[in-house]
Image (spheres, rainbow, N blue to C red):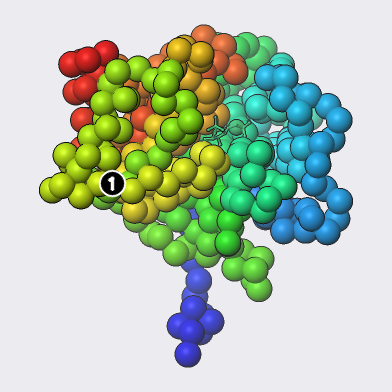
Amino acid sequence: VDAQLLQTDPLTLSAWILTQQHRSPNARGRLTVLLNAIGVGCKFVASAVRRAGLAGMMGMAGSENVQGEDQKKLDVIANEVFKNSLRRSGQCCILITEEEDEPIFIEKEHRGIYIVVFDPLDGSSNIDCGVSVGTIFGIYKAKDPQAELAGNSTLDDVLRPGTEMVAAGYCMYGSMAYMMITTGNGVAGFTLDPTLGEFVITHPKVQVPPRGTIYSINEGNAANWDPATTKYVENCKSGKYNNGKPYSLRYVGSMVADVHRTLLYGGIFMYPADKKNPNGKLRVLYECFPMAFLVEQAGGKATTGTARTMEMVPTSIHGRAPIYLGSKEEVEEIERLKKECG
Ligand code: AHM
Ligand code: MG
């Protein structure tokens, strides 16, 4: 008998969010409302991803996004879903989405005190072949809530280090939809129960193993890597780190999926700077920071190679940075090699 089917007291995402809020005596339930709005967006997108092939949502939507890449229909849909859900929550003042060049300042009637940065559908090259994609989000609280409520929003509220985020997470749309979330008190993981339509807790306290035997990187770029990355990967293959046995390579090409596996199994995920892309590929605000926050909260580490990712101060809303994240000891080895060979 499947024990899960008999679970008569499932801890849902909404209930968990409430328990997190109860920890803080001054909480007024606003973050709870906001996180619930994100949960609803994720459920919508999870359902859309499942129906995409049938409902004609695959293929290009005919427009380009900020970075000049073709947008897929599902990217556009996911972006609309999150914008609408976040606006309607009444808790946000500024939204930054990967799909739009400019920040979105929320109009007075729906304005709140939180800033949400998000990538509505990350890993879009994987949509049309049915491979995992995901949503990534990070949340800041306005520095001066009164000013925000009055409508005096500035980008100073957004261009802040990851250490100032109050919550972050991702939802992976894979074999199941998985939500990993932190409010700065560890990481909890939820699985969408399709029969209930609710995220139910399945990973109450996610801990990334201190070492791992999986490395994850786009090896097609090897010719352009920096010496430290080259050396690390060479050592992974030669067995230097594993009593003569090589590490395994896994690379989905969806950051959410590659980070999800790294959180659960350990190992390292890398998107380094290379000769062609001096700042790497991944975006600081809504890709690097939320993932770094989660990984640190799960006992792992995240670095640009030379600095703790979370302490970076972004200079533009769509800026990029190199990233190495995962098991503590693997990331420390990269840091050591960076100092040794650059
Ligand atoms: P996207 O936001 O256009 O989907 O790009 C981000 C994705 C990440 O999910 C993934 O880690 C990376 O791009 C893969 O890039 P590459 O194809 O260069 O290996
Ligand atoms: Mg992305």
Give the residue displayed 23% in from the left and 34% down from the top: 235
Query: Is the residue indicated by label 1 positioned so its CB lies within 8 Å of ligand 1?
Result: no
Outermost residue, left direction?
Answer: 243
- Between 289 and 89, the one nearer to me in the picture: 289
User: Residue at left 21%, top 30%?
Assistant: 333
Q: Is residue 90 left or right of residue 161?
A: right
**Structural crowding at the residue carrying mark 1, measured as other residues with C-alpha within 10 Å and reported as few (<14), some (14–19) or many (≥20):** many
- Residue 19 visible from this viewpoint: no
Above or below residue 332? Residue 223 is above
Residue sitting at x 51%, y 13%: 276
State whether residue 118 is above or below residue 338.
below
Type of the residue with mark 1: Tyr
Ligand 1 quadrant? top right
Helix, strand or loop at disc 1? loop
Residue at the outermost bottom position: 1
Side of 55 where 191 appears, left or right: left
| Residue matched to label 1 | 247
* Residue 226 % position (x, y): 35, 17
- Give the residue drawn at x 44%, y 64%: 202
Q: Quadrant of residue 115?
A: top right
**Where, quadrant-wise, is the C terminus in this rendering?**
top left
Q: Is residue 60 visible?
A: yes
Location of residue 217 by image quarter: top left
Percent of width and height locating residue 271: 44, 28
Q: In screen coordinates, is 168 left or right of 129? A: left
Q: Nearer the viewer, residue 80 or 84?
A: 80
Q: Is residue 58 above or below residue 13?
A: above
On the image, the x and y values in percent for residue 256 come to 52, 43
Position of 97 relative to 16 (above/below): above
